[in-house]
Amino acid sequence: MVPPREVSPHCPPRPPEDVLPRRKVPYLRCAFRQPRAQPLKRGQCDQGTEPVARGYRAERRSTCPRTYTLHPSVAEVPAVATASLQRLRPRGEQGPASGRAARLHPRSGMDPVLSAVRLSVQEAVHVLSSSEDGGHIFSTLGSLKRYLGETENPALPEEQEEFARIHFPTVLRCLVRRLRPGWLELLPNRQLEQLWASFFLTGPADQAFLVLMEAIEDVAGPSFRLMKMARLLARFLSTGRMAAVLEGQCRQQAEPAFPLLQATLLAKVVSLPDRLGNRLQRENLAEFLPQNYFPLLGEEVLRVLQGVVDSLRGGSDCSVSFLSQVLGKACVLGRQKEILGTLVPRLTVLTQSHCLWQRVCWRLVERVPDRAMEAVLTGLVEAAPGPRVLSRLLGNLVTKSKKAQFVMTRKLLLLRFSCTIPVLQSLLGYLAEDSQRRPLLVQALKELLETWGSSSAIRHTPLAQQSYISKATLICLAHLQEAELRDCRAELLASLMAGVKCRLDSSLPPVRRLGMIVAEVASARIHPEGPPLRFQYEEDDLTREMLALAAPWPVTDSPSEAGPPVAPIRGEAPDNETTASGGPQAQPEGSDSELDSDDEFVPYDMSGDTELKCGKAPAYVRDCVEALTASEDWERWEAALRALEGLVFRSPAATREVSVELAKVLLHLEEKTAVAGFEGLRQRALVAVTVTDPARVAEYLTAQFYALNYSLRQRMDILDVLALAAQELSWPGRLGKAQRTSLGPSPQPSSTAAPAWQAVVEERIQSKTRRFSKGSAGRGPAAVPNEFNAVAGYFFFPLIQRFDKPLVTFDLLGEDQLVLGRLAHTLGALVYLAENTSVAVPMGKALLEFVWVLRFHGDGYVRRGLLSAISAVLLSLPAERLLADLPDELLETRSWLADVAVKDPDEDCRLLAVKALLLLEKLRDKLLALSSP
């Protein structure tokens, strides 16, 4: 405190103490020695003076001390804000209940009416604070009720206004301080408790709410006062007093609203479940749970909106800004479903026939702050049952608000992909509903096609988002007319063709299929005069769903009411037996079809018949080679192909003589006739040859993998054959199994099937036989050496040593990324199959170097192959050898896997990275267990 100055003879006379100012807007005034001092800015100091806070005035008394007193209009400030400001008072001066609380403005005169209210409140507060007489307390509270207008002789309107505006919070805080079990029991039949609670339930709702929240938050721990105030707050909510709190802020048009009061009310209204949950913890009441509170808040907002509509019909002005802030903050906190689930169904009905309700809804959403606009619009789009309802709730908001336009046309379409198909239909249907919004739909289609055709977006966005953008593109095309598409045809076609090229070059089949579907539909809609694009792809649920989205949707309030349009399946011809009306065509009388009917004949069973073959299957491997290369007899050619696998396993010595020549023939073999399962027969024959002579055939195949004049299909066939042959070689008991399964054609079932009587006799013998002991049910497979151990190097090292050397027609690091991904998968499989072999450690180290070079590859399929290769190394190599030979590689791999598990756009890559990290953790635990004594 600054010491008081000496009394000056020029000091003006002291103003009367019982006069209160009538000015409603807070202001600053300093009066020390001059009769009229200039107002100071916030935080500014005069010479030798202290800064004056807003809402306080420095006045000169008889001794001219600097004293700060609260302006009456600041009594509207919430208790939390007022408590911080009251610390500026000099010691010894109390609040408005003390003798010198409400200082007077020098320009205001005597007002005995207001002075009487202040004196009555001071006397009542003194009685409530000190008296223990229940009757005296009851009568004192009853005398204060007249200022609330609830008695037979209410106070004058001016007195009620002053009491509600200035003194009501003081009375409530006094009642809170006196709250204890013995005090409420001073009168029987809970008379004092009911009268005490009535002040909170009937007075000004905003001040009562703030005092209740202040009292609950100031309690140190669980106590009687805390639970009593919590139950009173629950009663406050159940009686609809929250609507009065909100309505009080909507009707403040005559005088400007205090920003600090609105900010405090907003924070406490929206965060009430969190505050009460933190304070009450396990003793929390059901009314304060978020799933119960926010639907109640939505109902109160509806009641206030009904009052706003009634006031507008009566000619009174209202504001919905505070309601917009409440709605926005509740949605930002993630409570869209709770509050909008209550608001949207009622507003859907109310806005259907009343234009005034539509205007109120439009203003309610327009006044939402920009920081909360995304959360509110997302919740409304998800809760609205259709585009027409969304149009009634939002109006032309996207043409008025830049933030809303960004959210509706970019954020929800390009950056987020969590919306369902009905939500996407509602959003794009809303843009297509009005002529002023349709240009935004055209602009959205341009941006969607540009993103859909971007090669960078294809590489770095997950498959779910690419599917989402493709569906949004098809819905936009279904909503736009031909004239609208004709104006921007060139731009749309350029984006479409670029996207088709990038997607067809992708190594992921789903990405290629999305490109085919969108290209077919979009080309037919954008350029109907040109030749249509046609692709061959699988028909599945996703394909049918996307083709259905391309058809125009019926205009209804809800897409779910109309049902999805049924798109015709490609290549499906109409049924010739049905007419246009849907009924079967009538047969003419006396037709030959009726006379020549064969319905009475029973068809002959031909299920056991076999097709007769004129050509004879070759009996030797050399005959098969000759038949596959020089024979013009196609039946013999087919018979040789079908018999080749069995002949190779039956005659391994003869196969080794012509193994390389036979592998060359099979690698270049083309399907000349429509042989069922041609690819499988050729692949199994190649695998059989490779297994029979692994070193020479593997050396030949790996050399041809990097040779010229081979197609990508042949190179991938080489990789598949090497992986399958390595698997066959590493399998225990491979030779015996091969011999058992390759013994020529099986005999006829009639010659091998046991007679029925023999089976019956055998069953009777087994049932009559008594056995005293039984041996083991079966013996495990005998331990045999891994045949892949000796030839693993022929399979692995020639494949990995030339991947970075591009050829004229083959570039693994360039356009041929599909083969690169298959190569990574194959190398990982070879390392995994070489488990417990002497060459496994050099293979694992070379594979880790291969992975480290390509770890930042842009294609998702390649990254999946690299991650599977890491898992193969961790599974196949012994833990001790990994730690001894590859410690640095493991540390680098761990940090890379952690980064991929979090940041990689491909979901499968993230999953594979997490699995590899788990394998590393198991490896570390295993090493720790071995090192511990």
Image (tube, rainbow, N blue to C red):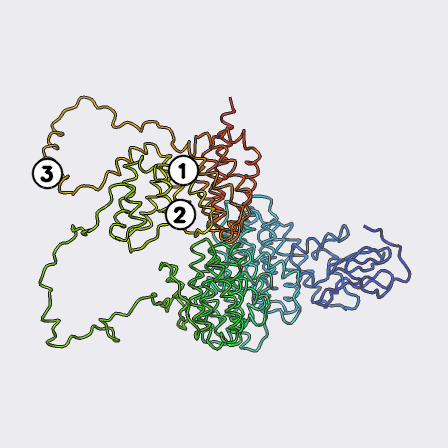
Q: Secondary structure at mark 1?
A: helix
Any mark on residue 717, and which? 2
Query: Mark 2 or mark 1: which is in front?
Result: 1
Asked if 639 appears above or below 73 in the picture, the reply is: above
Determine contact: label 2, label 1, CB under 8 Å. Answer: no
Q: Nearer the viewer, mark 3 or mark 2?
A: 2
Q: Tell me the SS state at disc 3.
A: loop
* Location of mark 3 (residue): 755
Residue hosting label 1? 696
Residue 591 lies left or right of residue 378; in this view the side is: left
How far separated are the C-alphas under marks 3 and 2?
46 Å
Residue 37 x %, y %: 84, 64
Number of other residues with Cα within 10 Å of mark 2, as a class: few under 14, some 14 to 19, many 20 or more: some
The amino acid beneath tag 3 is Pro
Counting every numbered tag in the picture gives: 3
Question: Residue 405 location, x and y as percent?
Answer: 56, 67
| Pointer 3 local density, CA inside 10 Å: few below 14, some 14–19, many at least 20 | few
Q: Nearer the viewer, residue 159 or 646?
A: 646
Position in image of residue 361 (x %, y %): 52, 70
Q: Nearer the viewer, residue 571 or 561?
A: 571
User: Around disc 1, counting alpha carbons within 10 Å, would you say few (fewer than 14), some (14 to 19), or many (20 or more)?
Assistant: some
What kind of residue is marked 1? Answer: Arg
Quick one: 318 or 536, which is closer to the camera?
536
Asked whether residue 240 is in view, the answer is no
Which of disc 1 and disc 2 is earlier in sequence? 1
> What's the residue at 38%, 66% (across, down)?
548
First along the sequence among labels 3 and 2: 2
